[in-house]
Image: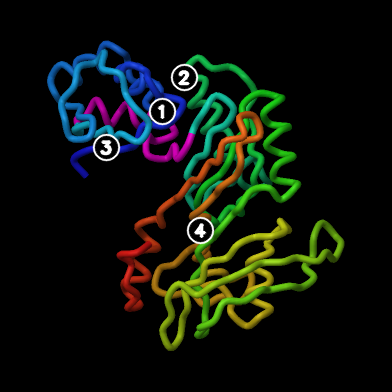
Amino acid sequence: MTITEWQINLREENLPLLEALSLRVPAAPKAFLRQLCKKQRVTLDGQVVKADHSVRAGETVAVKMSQRWLECLEQSRIQPEQVLYEDVQCIVVNKPAGLAIHRAHGHDDNLLWHVQDFLRLRGEKFQVAPVQRLDIGTSGAALFGKGHASISQFGQMIMDGKATKRYLALVEGRVTSPGELSSAVPAKGNIKEALTRFRPVASSDEYSLLEMELITGRRHQIRYQLATAGWPIVGDTRYRGKVISDMDRPFLHCHHLSFKHPETGQPVEINCPLPEKLLMQLKALGFTTESL
């Protein structure tokens, strides 16, 4: 890749380009960022603009690569394109597979620490906490609240089921019709009812790509219910999923998160594209991926 690209979000709306750059790559000195703008190595929607130009939400920032820029990206922990959405109350980050949301046994490194370090580099010292759970092997949109009040508000929103969470899962078996998985699943030593809606996105003779919508939020809900239905997730060895090629993770990705903002009341809709490795796996199996 010769450029780094991302879209301006609400947190950056109306800020000078220089400030917006600094928020996304807080390890980069502002003098260096200013030089990038001066040397026309930064564009906004394909146009060269000055460092003091005001940015708008939805505009695309592109920065040409250099060794120093790469060093700044590495120091920033959270990459610019990982920030899927941000405002003053919350931040949504694209979690990679293999990284725990918070500290867990055998997994000291975690996304919470990355987000905390990212905000610390900005000089923002308020508390931040995840309010949405993703398994270590699952990738996709992860929501964090900023500050005690927002963490409580967003946490309650998730508990009340007022957020829509959709996942993409590649499963064994041919699934051709939408439906529901309604069954009891193990949850914290108990057995609790769980409901997941699904629809096939694409299928072959052996595999199906399903979009799953969580109605309840039990631990391992999608993984457990799909395996019980006879459609284990590819790569999910815990639930008898087949390992294909070099798949070292379950093919499960949170690709959509939407909610009514508990503070502003405004609708928020966030989409998170499939990681390149999962796209390559689909292509290797003969699936078309242009619409994903």
Q: Percent x, y for residue 259?
A: 60, 44
In contact (CB < 8 Å): disc 1 and disc 2: yes
> Residue type at mark 1?
Ser
Label 2: state its secondary structure: helix
Q: Of label 3 and label 1, which has the lower sequence position?
A: 3
Q: Position of residue 3 (x, y in %)?
A: 21, 38
Q: Secondary structure at mark 4?
A: strand
Q: CA distance from mark 3 to mark 1?
A: 14 Å
Task: Name the disc covering residue 4, or none.
Answer: 3
Say what amino acid the circle numbered 3 marks: Thr
Residue linked to disc 4: 253
Residue 210 numbered tag: none
Residue 199: x and y in percent read 54, 72
Single out the mark in the foreground, 3 or 1.
Answer: 3
Tell me the crowding category of disc 2: few under 14, some 14 to 19, or many 20 or more residues within 10 angstroms, Cα based: some
Image quadrant in which the N terminus is located:
top left
Query: Which range of residues does the magenta coloring cover?
Result: 66-85
> Which quarter of the figure has residue 29?
top left
Q: Nearer the viewer, residue 256 or 251?
A: 256
* Residue drawn at x 32%, y 16% as measured from the top left: 16
Report x, y in % for residue 171: 52, 75
Question: Which of the marked residues, 1 or 4, is nearer the chain's N terminus?
Answer: 1
Q: Residue furthest right?
A: 190
Q: Amino acid at mark 4?
A: His
* Quadrant for the C terminus in the image: bottom left
What whole-number distance in Å separates the C-alpha atoms at marks 3 and 4? 23 Å
